[in-house]
Amino acid sequence: MSEIVPTLLQVAVLVAALGLTVPLLGRLLAHAYTSPRHLAVERVTYRALRVDPDADQHWRTYAMSVLGFSLVGVLALFAFGRLQEHLPLSLGFAALPTDGAWNTAVSFVTNTNWQWYSGEAALGHLMQMSGLTVQNFLSAGVGMAVAAAFARGLARRGGAGRVGNFWADLVRTVLRVLLPIALVAAVLLVVMGVVQNLAGPHLVDTLTGGNQAITGGPVASQEAIKELGTNGGGFYNANSAHPFENPTPMSNLFEIFLILLVPFAMAWSFGLIVGDRRQGVAVLTVMGLLLAVSVALITWAEMAGPGTAPQLAQGALEGKEQRFGTAGSALFAAVTTGTSTGAVNTMHDSLTAPGGGVALFNMMLGEIAPGGVGSGLYGMLMLAVVTVFLCGLMVGRTPEYLGKKIGQREIVLVAAYVLTTPVLVLVGSAVALTASDGLAGLQESGPHGLTEAVYAVTSASNNNGSAFGGLTSGTPFWNTLLGSCMLLGRFLPMVVVLALAGRFATQPRLPAGAGTLPTHRPLFVVLLSGVALVVVGLTYVPVLALGPIVESLS
Amino acid sequence: MNDVLYLLLTLVAFALLAVLVGALDRYLDDPADRVDPTDPADQTAQTELATQGGAA
């Protein structure tokens, strides 16, 4: 247990850094989503896009803008992949196969960043910079815009279904928030040792007499938005375990900080947008509690968990980088699966069975603790609606959240949201485990093999993007299955969220009465946490029992 | 040929999502929610909307 002190120290530093920066960024975000003024650079962008940023869009128009913009993104990235060999800075790499190009296009547009390929062995610099990194900014911006629209829907009274302007939200998110922070973060990462150049492969002779190609590239600039936007797609196959992406314990902690910054700040900004900061703090507290529990569980599992070898070695060291240690790896694993990031600094296939199970459970929670940028906030708010609905049933009052009545139509939408991802995960897993092409990709059998397949489909459907490993996913079957899960897992919930935002915006905002459940008090924090765990538990316990739980017990 | 198939898959997926948007819009189109300009209560709602600005 020699790592206890540094473990607690890095958590304390992380909490302090977030405590200082989250309120500041939350205020910046709230201002960006409520200010009527446009910056000069934004006006230029609107003119180039030929959009009217002052048009207050009906939720339907907002949703169609999201879909249209994302469709163009998928088609453009697909073309990038298929035409790579003809593009400059391709480093001689061939075009991606059709299914692979489609999977990659969908993956980056949906903020998933599932990677079936090895970045340094398949993609040129232009594809990485102009294709993937650009989508890292835009897909994060889309998620945050939808969350802002949902918060606006809750804040408005009699808004006739109008939830703001998608183009203004997107452009402001990227230009006012993501780009400036990513720029500073990239410079800091370079200072910490992350590479940033346009070098091609450099051949070296290894100690054993072999040859190895070491590829440089614009890594720091991609790494910054990869973490900040909870994207997770690495420049290298080893992702944040690679020393060029994440060279030191300091860079490791900084990358964890970047991952958590925006999701928590979105919750803070939510309170400001709805005019009651306590509401944002309550949501943020639930996110923090759930994350803290998963950090504690994975850290325990990896440092003192079951198994003779881990106990003798004072930690499960297989698949971990010694420079991060067991605790630094466990913390990263909890954060990356709790936030829909999907970057990894350790091989999740090598986590202990309970550790891997918690990582899987984090994603099954629906990426709400604290979740992806934007998607974490609206996912948690949907569960908040479920919570007030259940509490309303218990006391016999019409449930309401922030003065908005939760009627039949509202709860139908919320139910559709809550069920969408589990259906994708369970049906997708069933398809993978019954098709011969699906089984052919598995390298393990038994409970661990089941976990590998379920983890992949869960990761794709929840737009996380981390890979458990042990799965050969670069085949037409897996690329198509996981691509479909990513696409539907991203946009089906988004459409429902926007519909509910429009519904709420239409309603008047009722004053709180004696029967109103306060949604800013500790009781609500406990209830919301419980609802999140129970909803997920009831849905996924059977598959968890057959996978990581039975593996833990065997 | 494969390219065309995946392009079609993409277009069909997004077209179905657009259909879902339309279906939800119809589902949520409750006549009771429509603003009646002759109703004093609805005029209040319109005034509030107008004072909340455009983009945000």
Image: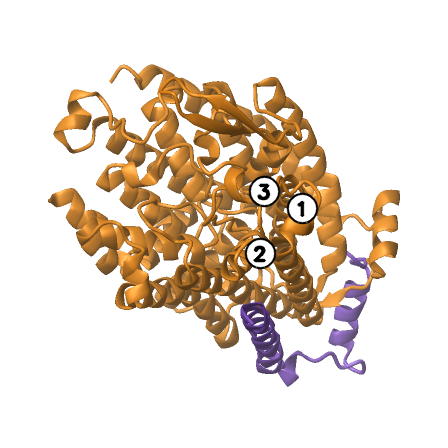
Chain colours: A orange, B purple
Q: Position of residue A212 (x, y in %)?
A: 46, 27
In the image, is A146 to the left or to the right of B41? Answer: left
On residue A105, the disc is 2
Q: Is residue A311 left or right of residue A243?
A: left
Q: Quadrant of the C terminus of chain A?
A: top left
Pointer 2 and pointer 1: residues touching (CB < 8 Å)? no
Is label 3 on the same chain as label 1? yes
* Quadrant (top left/top right/bottom left/bottom right) for the N terminus of chain A: top left
Mark 2 and mark 1 lie on one chain; the one further toward the N terminus is: 2
Residue A450 at what x, y percent from top left? Answer: 24, 55
Tag in front: 3 or 2? 2
Distance Cα–Cα, label 3 vs label 1: 11 Å
Residue identified by numbered label 3: A229
Label 2 environment density (alpha carbons within 10 Å; few <14, some 14–19, many ≥20): many
Q: Is residue A276 visible?
A: no
Q: Amino acid at mark 3?
A: Gly
Residue A12 in view here: yes
Q: Looking at the image, do the residues carrying marks 3 and 1 touch, with CB atoms under 8 Å apart?
A: no
Q: Secondary structure at mark 2?
A: helix
Q: On the image, which quarter does residue A301 sit in?
A: top left
Q: Which residue position holds label 1?
A: A134
Q: Which of the chains bears the disc numbered 2?
A: A
Q: Is residue A21 left or right of residue B45?
A: left
Q: Quadrant of residue A3?
A: top left
Q: Could you say where residue A23 lies in the image, as x and y percent from the top left? A: 61, 34
**In the image, what residue type sits under mark 2?**
Ala
Q: Which amino acid type is shown beneath numbered disc 1?
A: Val
User: On screen, A144 above or below A414?
Assistant: above
For disc 1, the neighbor class at 10 Å (few under 14, some 14 to 19, many from 20) is some
Vertical order, B5 against A454 (above or below): below
Q: Are marks 3 and 2 on the same chain?
A: yes
